[in-house]
Image (cartoon, coloured by chain):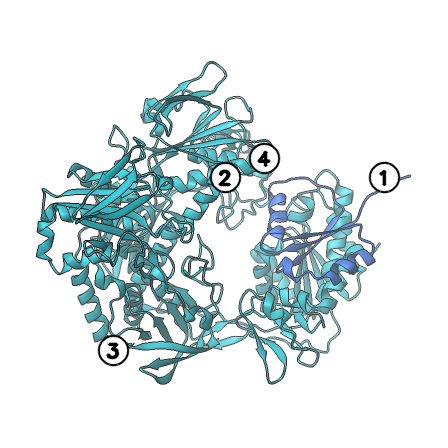
Chain colours: A blue, B cyan
Amino acid sequence: MAEFEPKILAFLCNWCAYAGADLAGVSRLQYPANVRSIRLMCSASVSPHHILKAFQKGADGVFVGG
Amino acid sequence: MESVSGEAGNFEVGIKQHPRYVDIDKCIACGLCAEKCPKKVENEYDAGLAKRKAIYVKYAQAVPLKYAIDAENCIYFVKKGRCKACEKHCPADAINFADEEKELAVNVGAIVLASGCEVFDPAVRDVYGYGRSANVVTSLEFERILSATGPYSGHLVRPADGKEPEKIAWLQCVGSRDVHGGAQPYCSAVCCTYAIKEAIVAKEHMKGPLDTAIFYIDMRTHGKDFERYYNRAEEIGVRFVKSKISAITPAGDNGNLLIRYADEAGRRVEEAFDLVVLSVGLGVPDQAAALARKLGIELDRYNFVAASSFDPVLTSRDGVFVCGAFQGPKDIPQSVIESSACAAAVESSLAESRFSLTRTKEIPEEIDVRGEAPRIGVFVCHCGTNIAGVVDAAAAAEYARTLPDVVYVEENLFSCSQDTQEKMTQVIKEQNLNRVVVAACTPRTHEPLFQETVVNAGINKYLFEMANIRNQCSWVHSGIPEAATEKAKDLIRMAVAKVGLLEPLYDPEIEVTPAALVIGGGISGMVAAKNLATQGFHTHLIEKSTALGGQARNLHATWLGEDVQQYLDRLIGEVESNNAIEIHLNTELTKVDGFVGNFQSTIATNGAEQVLEHGVALIATGASELKPQEYLYGEDPRVLTGLDLDRKFIDQDPGLKEVGSAVFIQCVGSRIPERPYCSKVCCTHSVQSALRLKEINPEMDVFIVYRDMRTYGLREDLYRQARDKGVTFIRYDFDKGLEVTREQESLSVRFTGYVLQRQMEIRPDMLVLAAAMVPPRENPVAQLFKVPLNEDGFFVEAHVKLRPIDFATDGVFVCGLAHSPKPIDEAIAQGLGAAARAVTVLSKKKIFGNALVAKINPETCVGCQGCLDVCPFGAINYFEDRHICQINQVLCKGCGACAATCPSASVELMGFRPQQLFAQIDRALAE
């Protein structure tokens, strides 16, 4: 059986976590490619609806960075 | 800067620009050059603790983020034409070995000196062992050790052996408050707080326990909220040891270091530490001093630019201004305040030529795409090899063609290059695209550029989306190209799904009323009003009391000895005679409507109300001296406050000659549990008054009983002068209390001396209480403008370091004592700074708001006001008559907290509407 590869959805604040993810790129820090990020203007705008929607659509994990 | 000729308003400045050998218009900061460069060089930014290459960026956050060649170390330059590895590998053809030094001449109206400071080099003093032991580091080196981008990636280890330290000592005043060789007599003002910060951060970095000890003379946490920070450090176990350390010796051969000091009981102690951090002070670089001298700028004895307290940003040469640490050692907030003050001073001197060199950009008319089916164009950027070297760009582009509504796909070598931009504009027009996706780097740096491109093609800038397939894809998945390609496809798919649902949005335009309201007629308020008026803006200055002047009315002299009353009379005269300033005395603010650009404020003058229209508001409501409840104040006429004594100086009270002995008690009402802040001005003020008393009667016995002497910065000179003149300074043990009683006819001050730990008693003829500075008990202005007060009652700025004059609410600014306790020079600087900040609004006819704001659907809003509670910007109002909330489009910053909170889903954030986000979520997770 293939190894379990979780699908992770990340909600990232434009001003900190998204910028951090960009900086990880500039610094060439390597990480697994199973995360997809959505840029928001503030993590405060993430509502439970978004998180539930992600799980409903098959996400194995949701990351809110802000 | 090589030469300056001409005069204020019309200088010719000769500038020499050193070659960087990299064309910054072409460099995309991909880093390939540095990766391939074979030459390693000591990295100055990491304080020599790590290596960089001969082609490099100075530090990760450098602006512009462009590489440069260090010709002194570059193999091509050293070995005459060899190597060229960077040129070979640069995908953008940005290397230019033929670059030359350029001579530039600029014509300017004013010059600002902001060349900063350098840190003391402890190697000139052998006693610290700096340079002999790698485990003795400077505070700047320690900053780099702590930094995630530093030499050890933020892992706290010793430079000598990579061992995690268990005990770290900080030695304060290295190179400061010291008259011995190479050091400076003044206080560097910032080191106490930064040492505390380093100790706290170091503790946070370690998994296990870390023993931290700070050896100090006086802890000088005089800045806003710094005292709380000091208290917090004590609570988490940072040790503070009052002892000046004069030598560090090796403790055996394990790299540890021995420090000898006297403990609180006066016993001699020897303690070994794994690492010793030297809190090095600040000084003026020789180069800066030489430049200033060449310009004919007067410097003080320490080479700081000599400035008066009343004109803190003016130099001795007309048209040349100064700000920051070149004017005296200071921290970030004060430097930022002064930079704004400098801007104000320059603006008022050049107000007539405002906008005379401005050019206006032509913007093509926007095409109305409403009702059209989406026609999406996708541009996939290779970024040289940065993206295409990992991600299969052709496959990603091919995939994009299969996505719904995508009608055009193109690959670009560099999407951001000038020629590609022009081509993109052309393609958008030719293909009748109405929405655009660029799959490239990050929207954080490139969204504005591409938005301009679509606007040039007549498309609304909000019909654009980026897919970040570089920073968050190719760069971080370089070893797994297949997975990276799949991720790139998904990111493009998400962007396409969202862009199809976006709608044109328009940044709201706001007309600006070119008038200011200044609340408070003290020094900082008047300085702000005068500057605004000089710049040509009508200014209302309202003052609660019957006269202008504020606290300065009670002050005799500045610490530099300048006459405050004389200055005040002059300033009041200038303000009163300026036609652009309308003074409203006996006036209070009763109501505020509107927002940045368009305020309508109701004021009541002796009960009569009128409405003022203004574009900005400056809060300068001040603070005052506490009337102490203790130490017989108000019961015995011999007990005065610091300002009571100033009144006697101003009135030239003959009784002062007769006083045989005086005691000053410091921190009366400050640094206590119910008022935990430091009032900043009282140490210097008492020292200054003590010197004045000595001048009036040299025979007088003058004692200053203190906890820490906080004569910060250049004020240290005054402290030394007072000791030389025979003023006796006694540090008392605060925990053991201090008592003032009346014994028959004499006053008795009893306390425990800190050094000797013995009961002491002084029976003075006069007792002066250095009373705290307190803000008004109630300040309705805060409520009226919806701006916050801290727990001490001072206004809370938008950002303690970077925005010390602004509020999170646009168009409202703070200055003077309303912000925090401060001396006159700093209050003036902040008053000027507030004027400069206000002019960023007032100088515009129109300002543009942000289109990405939240909107409430009035049909479904039930008026629960949940959104109102979470809005950090005071942008939401509840309308009682209609039972609904509405959002002010100008004040809203688009955080979306309201949208996430609303239980009836009546709030939507434009550009991030539910269907747009749900489409992204759906497309992110689709198979």
Q: Residues within 10 Å of mark 4 (few under 14, many from 20)?
A: some
Pair 3/4: label in front? 3
Separation (CA) of disc 3 from disc 4 = 63 Å
The residue wearing badge 3 is B579
Amino acid type of the residue that numbered disc 1 sits on in the rendered structure: Glu
Q: Which of the numbered marks, if any, corresponds to residue B35? A: 4
Q: Amino acid at mark 3?
A: Asn
Badge nearest the viewer, 2 or 1: 2
Mark 1 element type: loop
For the N terminus of chain A, the quadrant is top right
Q: Nearer the viewer, residue B420 or B795?
A: B795
**Disc 4, SS:** helix
In the picture of the structure, the residue carrying the numbered disc 2 is B200
**In 3D space, how far apart are the residues under numbered discs 4 and 2 (Cα atoms)?**
35 Å
Give the structural element (helix, strand or loop) at label 2: helix
Q: Are marks 2 and 1 in contact (CB under 8 Å)?
A: no
Q: Is residue A66 above or below residue B187?
A: below
Q: Check residue B301 in the rendering and tell me which mark sits there, or answer none.
A: none
**CA distance for labels 2 and 1:** 42 Å
**Mark 3 or 2, nearer chain start:** 2
Q: Position of residue B548 (x, y in %)?
A: 25, 70
Label 1, label 3: how far apart the Cα atoms are? 79 Å
Residue B504 visible (yes or no): yes
Question: Of the residues under marks 3 and 4, which one precedes in the sequence?
Answer: 4
Which residue type does callout 2 highlight?
Ile
**Residue matched to label 1:** A3
User: Chain under label 2?
Assistant: B
What's the residue type where badge 4 is placed?
A: Glu
